[in-house]
């Protein structure tokens, strides 16, 4: 008779095992998703073909993936910074909205300024707006003992509705549609060559590298990691834990705000409600799947952005409901989290004599 025994792994899992578990988890999620298509009477092979073609099947599809991955990467990078201290910022969606609002205010107020002046001012305004919005739950947590998950979640809806208030009201275009006037040329981040991908991709590369260097070589980065590993030990050793909580939330909100700036400046060229497509919520999934690693966040952002593009293709070609994309993201998260069990534990079979 065989006995099942579960033991914790003493050594960290090698890269090949992590890659194998992640690949197997994503494959499992895709199989389950294809079974859902079968229930709707759609061939799973046809559905998978349409999904992959829309995601990675052409040059246009790859460029669309990169466009969706840029704001997703920045929101995920911000969320990951807060998560490293075990501060649960669920408010990247609202911080993204406030960043877009801050950048738009600068673009509408100083549209005639030179490009090399206006774009940095838009970035600054977006980061300040997103950072201050994220600082509110940090202060509530430290001063009032409020749960940052609840506060950041509620602030999402306030931020989104504030954006709607502006585009339906004081910033509404003269055409009558709920959007602002188009930005001036000086307020627009340009494209890379003849592609549809904008220079926000370079912003992501630089910010991802800076984030990695910050955590690897700075004292504050070390204190954030140490505080996340053991709060009581961090306080006992004299680390400024309250300051670190506010710092990670401000940095997190600023990066989400930067993503909002890129979306209105480089992609839409104005502020409108359609920019709110859930990047801030998906960022939570990306950060966890990538284990808070900037390089992993880049890869995971691209993959999930590809799945978003593929689901849009499914909607157009096979009339799949829009909710299918959320189902697919949820399945991927659940299967990867379940697969993470095998990275931390091993299953041993022992025969009873």
Image (cartoon, rainbow, N blue to C red):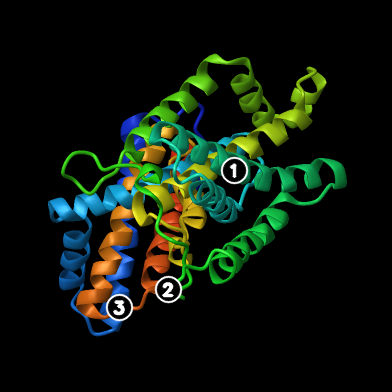
**Residue at x 57% of width, y 41% of height:** 125
Foreground residue, 22 or 118?
118
Q: Secondary structure at mark 2?
A: loop
Q: Position of residue 129 (x, y in %)?
A: 62, 45
Task: Report the residue that reaches farthest toward the left.
Answer: 58
Which quadrant holds residue 230? Answer: top right
The residue tagged 3 is 320
Q: Which label is found at residue 175?
A: 2
- How dense is the environment of label 3, judged by Cα within 10 Å: few (below 14), some, or many (20 and up)? some
Q: Position of residue 313 (x, y in %)?
A: 23, 68
Q: From the viewer's perspective, is 200 left or right of 251?
A: left
Q: Secondary structure at mark 1?
A: helix
Which quadrant holds residue 275? Answer: bottom left
Q: CA distance from mark 3 to mark 1?
A: 34 Å
**Residue at x 33% of width, y 60% of height:** 308
Residue 105's place in the image compared with 240, above or below, is below
The residue tagged 1 is 253
**Residue at x 54% of width, y 63% of height:** 171
Whether tag 3 and tag 1 are in contact, CB under 8 A, the answer is no
Q: Position of residue 25 (x, y in %)?
A: 35, 52
Q: Secondary structure at mark 3?
A: loop
Front label number (2 vs 3): 2
Counting residues from the N terminus, which is met first, the one under dot 2 or under dot 1?
2
Foreground residue, 17 or 87?
87
Whether tag 2 and tag 1 are in contact, CB under 8 A, the answer is no
């Amino acid at each position: 008779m065989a006995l099942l025994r579960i033991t914790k792994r003493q050594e960290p899992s090698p890269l090949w095992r992590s890659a194998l578990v992640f690949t197997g988890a994503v494959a499992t999620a895709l199989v389950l998703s294809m079974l859902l298509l079968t229930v709707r009477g759609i061939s799973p092979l046809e559905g998978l073909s349409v999904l992959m073609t829309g995601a990675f099947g052409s040059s246009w599809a790859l460029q669309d993936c990169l466009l969706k991955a840029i704001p997703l990467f920045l929101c995920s990078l911000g969320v990951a910074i807060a998560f490293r201290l075990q501060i649960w910022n669920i408010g990247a969606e609202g911080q993204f909205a406030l960043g877009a609002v801050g950048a738009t205010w600068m673009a509408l107020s100083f549209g005639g300024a030179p490009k090399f002046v206006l774009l940095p001012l838009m970035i600054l305004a977006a980061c300040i707006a997103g950072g201050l919005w994220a600082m509110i739950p940090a202060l509530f947590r430290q001063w009032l003992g409020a749960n940052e998950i609840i506060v950041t979640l509620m602030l999402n809806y306030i931020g989104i509705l504030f954006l709607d208030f502006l585009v339906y009201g004081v910033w509404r275009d003269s055409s009558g549609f709920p959007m602002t006037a188009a930005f001036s040329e000086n307020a627009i981040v340009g494209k890379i060559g003849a592609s549809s991908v904008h220079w926000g991709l370079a912003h992501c590369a630089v910010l991802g590298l800076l984030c990695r260097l910050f955590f690897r070589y700075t004292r504050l980065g070390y204190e954030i990691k140490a505080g996340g590993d053991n709060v009581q030990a961090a306080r006992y050793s004299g680390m400024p834990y309250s300051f670190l909580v506010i710092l990670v939330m401000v940095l997190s909100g600023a990066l989400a705000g930067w993503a909002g700036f890129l979306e209105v400046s480089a992609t839409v060229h104005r502020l409108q409600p359609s920019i709110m497509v859930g990047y801030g919520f998906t960022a939570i999934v990306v950060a966890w799947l990538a284990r808070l690693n900037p390089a992993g966040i880049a890869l995971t952002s691209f993959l999930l952005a590809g799945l978003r593009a593929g689901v849009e293709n499914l909607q157009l070609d096979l009339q799949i409901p829009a909710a299918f994309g959320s189902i697919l993201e949820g399945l991927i998260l659940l299967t990867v989290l379940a697969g993470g069990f095998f990275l931390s534990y091993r299953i041993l079979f022992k025969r009873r004599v």
